[in-house]
Image: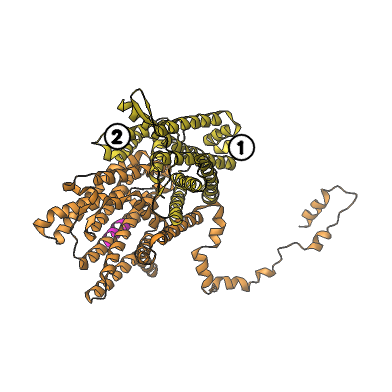
Amino acid sequence: MKFIETLLNGLSMGSTYAMIALGYTMVYGIAKMLNFAHGDIIMVGGYMIFLSMTAVGNPVLGLAAAVIFCVVLGITIEKIAYKPLRGASPLAVLITAIGVSYLLQSSAQMIFGSAPKMVIIADLGNLEFAGLKVPVYTLVTLGCSVVIMLALNLFVKYTKIGRAMIAVSEDKGAAQLMGINVNGIITVTFAIGSALAAFAGFFMLMKSPSLTNTLGAMPGIKAFTAAVIGGIGSIPGAMVGGILIGVVEAISLTVPAIAAYTDAIEFLILIVILLVRPTGILGKKRREKV
Amino acid sequence: MAGKIKNIKWKYYINYIAIAIFTVVFSVMSFTGNLSSSNIYLLEKIAIAVMLSVSLSVVVGFLGELSLGHAGFMCVGAYLGGKASCILEPVLGNGVLTLIISLIAGGVIAALCGIIIGLPALRLKGDYLAIVTLAFGEIVRSLFMNSSDESFGGSLGLNTPRYDKNILYIIAFVLVLLCLAVLQNLIRSKHGRAITSIRDNEIAARATGINVTKYKLAVFTVSSFFAGIAGVLYSYSNFTVQSTKFSYNYSIEILVMVVLGGMGSINGSIIAATLITFLDVKLQTILTGNLAVLQDLFYALVLIILVIYNNAPGLKSFRETNNLKSIFNKIRKPKRDPSRRADDEAKWDRVPTKIEMNEILSVEIQPTSSTVEPDRKENKND
C-alpha cells in the first residue's frame, strides 16, 4: 500500500518533470539549443499565478494568465536573445541562455523580494480508497499532464504545424526548401514550451505553496537531466525520462538512509546512462559530418 | 629583428609583471600598516577568483568545452585541503608546511576528480558535457553536505584554521603566478595549439593526428587541479567551508568572469575576475536589500549583450566597424604613411578610369550593317 502511494506520488512528480522536460527537448530538437532559462519561465509563471490569485482568486484564471504571460515571455526571449545568435557557436547560445536565466531570476527578486510568497491554490484534501491515502493534487497533476502530453503528441503527429516541427528538427535546410517557415516554427516551439512550463509551475505550486525566485532553477535542471536521460530531441524520451526521475525521487525520498542524497542519485543516474548510451534511452544517434 | 623579439617578450610577460608589482605594492602597504583587514580579505578573494577564472578559461576558451562544475572541483579542494590542514595543524602547527601539504592534497584530489569527470567528457561534448559537469558539481556538494559531523562537518560546514592573514594573500598571489606560468606555457606550446585546434574543429584535429582524448583529459585535469588549489586557499581564508557556497550558481559566476574577460584571453579573465570581485565586495556595503539584485541584473544584461555582440552572425559588419580597436584608432591622431604619400604624388586620381558620357554617345552605329561589324572595326583600330 505504502509502495503504491509512493509510486503515485512519483508518477505525479514525474509528470511535472516530464512537462518541463518536453519544453527543453522540443526547443533542443528544433532550435538545436539548450534553453537554460526554461526553468525560470516556470518561476515567472508561478509569480503570475500569485498575482492573479491575489487579484481575482480563481486558480483557473490564474493558470490562464500565467500561460499567456509565459508564452509572450518565451517568444520575446527567443526573438531578442536567441534569434540574433542563430548560426553562432552553441557555446555562445548556451551562455546567452544562462544570462537570460540570471536576468529572469534577478528581476523577479527585484520586483517581488527574496522572501517566499505563499500561493495556496486550492485545498483539495486526500482521497481514501481501499486503504490507500492519496492527496488529490497528485491525481489532478497526473490526469492533467497525461491529457496535455496526449494532446501534444496528437498535435505533433497530425497537424500541419506539428509535422513542420518534425521536419525542421530532422533537417532545417531541407524544411526551408519545402516552404516551411523555420523561424515561425521555432517561435511556435518556444510558445508551446513556455505554456508547458506555466502548467508545470501551477502543479508545483499545488504541491508546495512556497514561491521564491529560484522555484524553477533546480526542477529545471532535473527536468533537463530527464530530457537528456530520455534522449534529448525526442518527445517520448522526455516523458520516459521525466517519469523515471520523478519515480526515483519519490522512492529515494521515502528511504531514510538515502533521502538526503536524492539529488546526487538522480544526477548519478544521468552520468551512468550517458556513459552507457551517450544519446540517452530513446535518442537517435546522429553522425557528425565535416 | 631584435626589437621585434623584445616586443613579443614584453607582451608575454606583462601579466606576470603586473601581478608581481601589485603584490609588492600591497605587501609594502600592509607592512607599513596602510592596508585594512577588509582590504586584505578582498585581495585574497581576488586571488582566488583570478585562479578560478583563469583555470576555467583554459577549458572554455581554449578547449571549447563548457564546464559548469568548476565550483565542484573547488569544493573538493576546499573540503579536502581544509580537512588536511585540520589534521596536520596539531602535529605541524599552522605553518607553511601544513599549507603546502594541504594545497597539494586538495589540488591532487581535485585533479583526480577532473580525470574522473574528464573520462565521460571524452564520449560527450557540448551541451551533454555541460550537464554532466553540472551534475558532478551537485553530486559533490550533496556528498559533503550530508557527510557526518566528524568527517566534513555536514550541513554546518567544516571549521578550518585561518592562516596568518598578513601572509596568506601574498602566498595566494604567488600561487596565481604559478598557475599563470603553467597554464600560459601550456597554451603557448605545441600542446596548446593542439588544444585550440580541437576547439576550432575536433574532427579536423583528429584527422591531423592530434590525440583528442589525451588533450581533453589533460586540460580537465590541469584546470581542476588549480580549481582545487583555489578551494584550499578559500578554506584558509575563511573559518568555515560550507557546501552551499559551491552551488552551480557559483560555477556560473566564474563562467561570467571568463566570458566577460573574453573567451580565449587569459589576461581578459584576470581583469574580469579582479573587477567583478572588487565590485562585488565594494557594492555589498552600498547596495543592500533588494538593491543588491541590481548588480546581478547588470551582470546578466552585460553577459547577454556582450555574447550577442561578439557572436551574432548578423552583426558581423557592425562588429568590424565598431570595436575597441577602431574606436582607439579614431581617437588616435591619424598618422600619415610615407608609402601612401608616394602614391598621392603619382596623382592616381587623375588617371582616367571612367568612360565619359560623350564617349559612349560618339560611337557610330551604321544603320545598314549588322550589329557585329562596329565591334570588329573597333578591334582592328585597337
Q: Which mark is residue B172?
A: none
Whether residue B178 appears in magenta in the rendering, the answer is: yes
- Front-most of residues A94 and A171: A94
The N terminus of chain B lies in which quarter of the figure? bottom left
Give the extent of the magenta segment: B177-184
Quick one: SS at disc 1? Answer: loop
Whether residue A238 appears in magenta in the rendering, the answer is: no
Q: Which hue belongs to chain B? A: orange
Residue A71 in view (yes/no): yes
State which chain disc 1 sits on: A
Q: Which mark is residue A252?
A: 2
Mark 2 vs mark 1: same chain? Answer: yes
Q: CA distance from mark 2 to mark 1?
A: 46 Å
Quick one: SS at disc 2? Answer: helix
Residue A133 x, y percent position in the rendering: 35, 29
- Front-most of residues B309 and B179: B309
Q: Is residue A13 above or below residue B196?
A: above
Residue A157 relative to residue B125: left or right = right
Name the amino acid, label 1: Ile
Give the residue number, with chain letter if any, for mark 1. Answer: A180
Q: Which hue belongs to chain A? A: yellow
- Colour scheme used in the picture? by chain
Name the amino acid, label 2: Ser
Residue B270 x, y percent position in the rendering: 35, 61
The number of callouts visible is: 2
